[in-house]
Image (cartoon, rainbow, N blue to C red):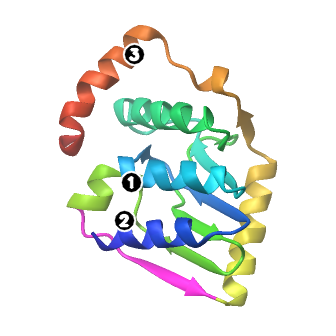
Amino acid sequence: NIATDVFLNIINSAKETIDITSPYLAIDYSLKNALINAKARGVKVRILIPTIPDKKIVYQFTKLSSYELSKYGIDIYKYSKGFNHAKGIVADGKIAYLGTTNFDFRSLFHHYECGCVIYNSDAITDFENKLEEVFNISNYQTTKDLKQNVLVRIFISFLKTFESLI
């Protein structure tokens, strides 16, 4: 899958920072592992998710992925003004992806999404500055904030079997 490969290349090449914004965060093992490994090698990783969901079940997947990543020290923020629909990733101020691809199974594997990879351009600085503004007005989430009750976790774990259909 091209989008997954692009995301993995951006994440794996990062040396200092990775910022991600996506309304949906239901990532597979490879992306989750890449983010955890980036954090382990000293990269500052921040992910922005919405506060208000547009799809409640998918939002539970987002919260579960966020919770799992936060346990490894990845910073999760909720956009304070509601639903954030922006999709993008930027690493080290040098490479970015902006487009329609969400960080979820359907978007990565079923839909024909499009996007633009930008390298060494002033547009990246503009994107980073805008993201910084949004992170500054967003609410940092602790692991405790993201933890779901046991029944929801069981339900979502069961639904993961059908994740490709959601």
Q: Which residues are magenta?
A: 111-119
Q: In the rendered structure, which amino acid carries the disc numbered 3?
A: Val
Q: Please, what secondary structure does the residue beneath circle 2 have?
A: helix
Q: In the rendered structure, which amino acid carries the disc numbered 2?
A: Thr
Q: Position of residue 101 (x, y in %)?
A: 40, 64
**Taking the image as drawn, is residue 99 in sight?**
no
Q: Decide whether residue 26 is among the magenta residues.
A: no
Quadrant containing the C terminus is top left
Foreground mark, 1 or 2, reads 1
Separation of marks 1 and 3 at Cα, in angstroms: 24 Å
Q: Earlier in the sequence, mark 3 or mark 2?
A: 2
Q: Earlier in the sequence, mark 1 or mark 2?
A: 2
In the foreground, 53 or 59: 59
- What residue is shown with label 2? 4
Separation of marks 3 and 2 at Cα, in angstroms: 28 Å
> Residue at (50%, 18%) from the top-left corner?
148
Query: Where on the picture, by quarter, is residue 125?
Result: bottom right
Numbered mark located on residue 30 in the image: 1
CB under 8 Å between callouts 3 and 2? no
CB under 8 Å between callouts 1 and 3? no
Number of numbered callouts drawn = 3
> Residue at (59%, 26%) from the top-left corner?
146
